[in-house]
Image: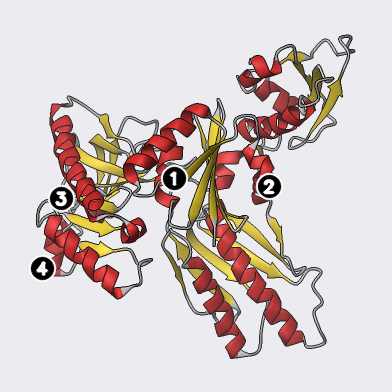
Amino acid sequence: MKSKILVDYESYMCSVALLEDSVLREFHVEDKNTNRITGNIYKGRVVNVLPGLQSAFVDIGLRKNGFLAAEDMLEDRTILTRSGAVPTKLDVREGDYVLVQAVKEPTETKGPRLSANLSIPGRYVIYMPTIDFVGVSNKITDEGARDKLLALLNKYRPSQHCGLIARTAAKDARKSDIIDEIEYFANSYISLLDKYRASPDVSLLYSDGNLIFRTVRDILNSTVDEIVCNSPAISKQLTEYLEQNLAHPVKVTLMQDTDVLKKFGVLGEVEKLLRHKVELSNGGSIVIDYTEALTVIDVNSAKFVGNVDHEQTVFEINCEAAKEIARQLRLRNIGGMIVIDFIDMHDPMHNAQVVDILSAETRKDRTRTRVLPMTELGLVQMTRKKTGSEIQSLLLQPCSHCHAAARTQSPIFMARRIKAQLTDIFADPMCTAAVVTVNPCVFADLSKGEWFDSFAGDRYSGKRVYLVSDAGVAPNSFRIGAKSTAVLSLPDSAYLLT
């Protein structure tokens, strides 16, 4: 299997995609005006203690206070090896300062989830300064390699009161690189404590880095043979990073004048991720619905008629659906509880095989998952650890015309789609202008943002882009007209983007 990482850097957003044998497996995006906090470490102040729930709300300098539960408040988890139980007593008072890490992003209704048990990921190891545990990633299955890594971590961990977990990349790493990373984390933690003591009030002490380097660090493996990037500056930084951290650096290819997401078919795939319905290659379909408590996935036969054997037809649909569901969970970054309603099958062996396929596919996911056996009703319950935000929350926003009952594409994604088409249009030297017609609510968003600054550069010198409002255009759609004349007929409300 050959894999490729695509890095798309824009003035207002950046995204990273992982292709495995040309199939999109992971997609990560970040709005530069929205700060991701998962992994950040703060000096927080307890503002409210809830004894009945054994939890507290902690001010970490954000709009909403973070939530800290008793089980995440252990200052030293070495006691677990002795007692075998997680204490439930919350030993903090209002006004106390605590060292905490954000482990879940805030939502529209809830603040971030916090933990006092720090976990700092690196390229080869995860460093846990307060947890007495040494382990190896479950993705490393070779027993010999696991034993060697365990011995290495036990020998070089900074103290018996801290913990280390070898990541998948550690299997092929040089021993010296792993040791250097462990020493770096040990020194960084000492500096972190110094900053905590020196800070007079609530403050951010550590950030997990920007999306590009954080994601490349996490998804880079031995199957990746190339990283394609459209930014000269980022391309240079990636090259330097890889040379410093890899024994055999991966090739970094700069495609400055190319829309890399469109070139490799990613942009169209991302648009599909925002839909509820997903078509299967055999004609079946799955429908994904989100609720506050869980995600529900329904499998349908749709257009697939199969052969004369109804049981075999349903089995084939469910098998294909199981593979696609695992892919969609990974792509959309769906976390929490998930319930899947497969089409009813009568053969118990078929039920078990479908669950086995789902389990095997989810094991390819970097994020921890758990799949339970199928119930008599044909339902499969599973969980997937929540890490960051789901793709729909990043690329969609509540519709302003229906009291948030529905969602429309966010300005950053609409701008990204429009820019992809404008790049193709202006590739024709005869084209001197373009008129983009959008829904009034999209017009209001795009006309007040700096979405198209890059079109003011030398490459598009002399080109003009006008934005026009039209209520007849759906909120998630747009029309673009290419012009090759200096005389344009435009409404008075037209807005000059570039």
Q: Secondary structure at mark 3?
A: loop
Which of the two discs, 2 and 3, sits closer to the camera? 2
Q: Which mark is residue 75?
A: 3
Residue 376 horizontal/vertical position (percent): 57, 84
Q: Identify whether 90 is placed above or below 323.
A: above
Pointer 4: what residue? 82
Within 10 Å of disc 1 (Cα), the crowding (few <14, some 14-19, many 20+) is many
Question: Residue shown at 41%/39% (left/top)?
Answer: 213
Q: Secondary structure at mark 2?
A: loop
Query: In the rendered image, which quarter contains the N terminus?
Result: bottom right
Is tag 2's residue or tag 1's residue first in the polypeptide sequence? Answer: 1
Residue 238 horizontal/vertical position (percent): 43, 37
Is tag 4's residue or tag 2's residue first in the polypeptide sequence? Answer: 4
Pointer 2: what residue? 265
Is tag 2's residue or tag 3's residue first in the polypeptide sequence? Answer: 3
Question: Residue shown at 24%/35% (left/top)?
Answer: 44
Pointer 1: what residue? 216
Is tag 4's residue or tag 3's residue first in the polypeptide sequence? Answer: 3
Q: CA distance from mark 2 to mark 1?
A: 20 Å
Whether residue 263 sits left or right of residue 331 in the image: it is right
Within 10 Å of disc 2 (Cα), the crowding (few <14, some 14-19, many 20+) is few
Q: Identify whether 435 is placed above or below 85.
A: above
